[in-house]
Amino acid sequence: MIDLFKSELLRFRLWAAVAFAVNLAVLSFLSRMMDLAQQPIFIYQLFGMVYVVAGALLGLYQMGTYRKPNQWLSLLHRPLHRLKIAGALSGANAVLLLVATALPILLVCAYQDTMTARVVDTRHWLLPVAAWWLAVSGYLAGAYAMVADRRYSFAAFLLPNLFMYAEASGVAMLGVQLVVIVFLAVLLAIAFKPDPSSVPSRNPLAVLAVALPVQVGAYFLLWLLGFAAELGWNVAGTHPLNAPEPPKGGYVQAQRAKGKDLLLLGIQDSRDPEAALWREQIALSDVYTTQPLRNLPVRNSLTNISPLEFADGDNNLMLVFSHDSERFVTRGLRDQRRIGAMGVGAEQAAFPAPTIPHGAMYLYNAHAVYQYDSEQQRMFERARLPPGEVMASPLEPAGDNILMFSDRAAYFFPGREAMSSLDLLKPLMRVPMSGQVGNLSRVDVVELLDGYLVSYTYTWGVWSGELQQPFQQVLRVDGDGHSREVTRRALSMDLPSMYTTRNVWLSPVIRELCLGAQDLFAASDPLRMKPQPMPASILWLAGACCLLSLLGAVWLTGKQAHSTSGRWGWVLLCGVIGLPALASLWLLYPMRERLDDLRLAQPAAA
Amino acid sequence: MNANDHVIETRALSKRYGRKLALDNLDLRIPRGRIHAIVGANGAGKSTLFRILLGFLPPTAGQARILGKDSQALTPQDRARIGFVNEEHTLANWMRVSQVTAMQRRQYPHWSQDAFDGVIGHYNVLPEQKVGQLSRGERAGLNLALALAQGPELLVLDEPTLGLDVVAKRAFLESLLYRNAADDCTVIYCSHQMEEIERVADNLIILERGQLKNMSAPDDFTARVSHWVADVPFKGPDPRTVPGLLEVQRLDGLHHYLVLDQSDGFERFLRDAGARNVQSMPVSLDRAINAFLAKNHATPVAA
């Protein structure tokens, strides 16, 4: 085994050396130009994608050369267990990917840590591991795609895509990567045998492991095919997004409407005695529109939503938030020399969560809003959320006052006090939300003579099947902070429910599986909502699809070679999972090879 | 003769590719020892047979055993007993000869350095040379040396001289024969080169369209095929009526018949058909096999 391992190292050593040099050169150049530890997430995603693709290409090439019939025979026809051969080949490439991906990042990390005043936290030292595991997952997916039957093996490339959607962060995200790597390694181990195209028949768990990515792939393919319907609506000119006027009372209209228009739409049917007055005031006043946050910075996350840094040019200061010290680390803007650290207030207290700049004046984290005072070179806490609530939108102007949202309510703070002092502000009023912040797409506020008119529009997730009853709610808030509902207007989805919920009725089980994978090892996110229950009609449709799939499996397994238990296991699986399982059954198993029909068809040899 | 006396044993072995039958109900039993040549036209099922025997392809029907083991359940220990050399001589191009040799030596428990040295001595191969730098003939020699040094009980050579020039072919055969490989193991030699078959084979196996057509000593097969030259006026007998006909040609006004399994009675047939003069002569193995294989060669319907 060690000989094969060394042989593979030898084979790709030059490639690895070139990849290492190129990676190090690019990272070194970028590191001279910018702080690589403080880049927005898409930069890390870009590098991550490059590593996954590089690993995948390596796997495809390596196994592609071995997978030729004579090469495959030479490789596997030797007195070594097949798993030892697979381990030697993949182990060698894992080592080479370590050199090509992790080592350059490690060197750049060490450079930034020891030779610059930039912040390098513990989380940054995990980036080489993350990059390496990304490349290894790409490699394993590529290797499996090439080794196993190509009718279905390329579905393995779906697994690294999970990293784009996974909600986990930090070490938990490494856990997700490890799970994907282990799963792909199991797939490769199953396929790595003299006849790789045969599906394991004796081990039901192995069958499920092979079938799972194929089913998820079929599920996404069927889901994507649904976009053909949208194409048709576009061609017909009836798509709500392309129509000259969006459908009245619908989702698109609510999304596109300006603040004034949306508030007017919200109260158009109101019989409130003040409604006429409000309409006049809306026409004359400014309407303030806010979209809630979808993510908050997470402690020890490997990446950043956006850079956790800002500059104070007046004082020649660069302030960078450190996850380790929970304070902003300061360095000279011009000389790049380390100065010190800055916490909250005079006591330089630690921030309770990673804190991110917002606009020109404020910084925020999950619990509070802060203001940096350049003259005093000090951080002041300006607004704080009650325990149990998290930030959904930091301070925004709303007429004379300023507005902040948590996941449960809107808070109005005195604008004049906010401008004239640096003290902790006390909310003037609290306006609770009746819906879930995860479904909230916009908040529109207009200041009245005595209070506010507040519109909450809950449409987030309406086209992804997560929200079934979108609505707009308009509240009247008086000067004392008492709120009452003026109107609650149900909004239509604009697209047929059967279309927007196809990710459910195609296979409720796979949808749950995908949602579970997305949340694997992730801490609960109060800004995200669980999908709402489906209407009964959609559940009946899902049941009909499962029944259809079950009947299809009875017919299809009759034409394939299965053991009795295997056959009825597949029938049951198709009944539970639905159409994607039927598609995977068709892809995984060829039709049974028979001889009698062939002999009848062939003319007798002369 | 019990099952263990056969290195290869198939029972009603069939393999279907789509609408084609690569192996058709093949019953084949190859006894232990000696050199067995397998010949057949392209598509006769030779490669399919080897892939099934080595467990790289499942049969559609029937059973295949190699060295007494089910071919679909070979263990690494079983594989150590079976050497395989294919026509591409697939070796790691990026490794040096010494590295490849060292790797094989460690992997095979019955490695024989003498056998390796004995074969590689026929070639001008240096240990420090990279495999990718070797000529095709040198690669073939190295591959044979590695296979024989493994000490296999069964050595399968699948068209090992394909693409080699005359000199390299001769070197390959000499190194194989010089080692007296058949003394230590059973050799299955698959080739299209009839002069090689003639030189090395003790037993001739002919496959055609996935079926076993002959298994005998080469001389016995040659004796089955006879060449008749007849001076027949006009067209001669309808070929469809000629018994055992493999090939008919008209050269210089004489009819040349290659026939299978015909005795002196064939002369009577020709004379009855109007032949004024009939002569019989022996045929070479090359010609006999070619005629045999060409008999059922597919031709367009219109031909």
Image (cartoon, helix red, strand yellow):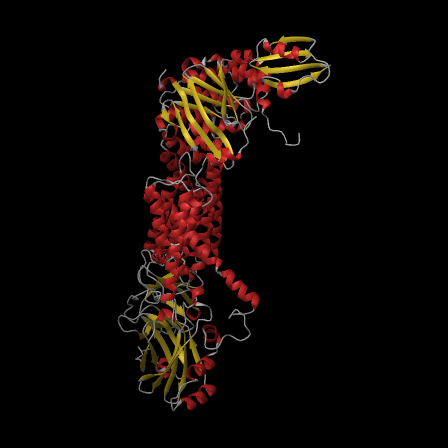
Residue A61: x and y, percent? Answer: 49, 40
Instruction: Please tell me which residue lies in front, A545 or A47.
Output: A545
Q: Residue furthest left?
A: A387
Residue B265: x and y, percent? Answer: 59, 10
Q: Does residue A36 sit above or below B111 in this rendering?
A: below
Task: Indicate left or right for A348 with B210 as reference.
Answer: left
In which quadrant is the C terminus of chain B drawn?
top right
Residue B201: x and y, percent? Answer: 50, 15
Image quadrant assignment for residue A148: top left
Instruction: Please tell me which residue lies in front, B94 or A490.
Output: A490
Instruction: Please tell me which residue lies in front, B137 or A104.
Output: B137
Q: Does residue A192 sit above or below B222 in this rendering?
A: below
Q: Does residue A495 sit above or below B35 in this rendering?
A: below
Q: Does residue B42 sit above or below B180 in this rendering?
A: below
Q: Which residue lies furthest to the front in this view?
A: B272
The number of numbered discs placed on residues in the rendered structure image is 0
Residue A422: x and y, percent? Answer: 34, 77
Q: Can residue B90 be seen in this view?
A: no
Q: What residue is rendered at 34% in x and 46% in y?
A: A568
Q: Is residue A530 visible?
A: yes
Q: What residue is rendered at 36% in x and 47% in y?
A: A570
Image quadrant assignment for residue A281: bottom left
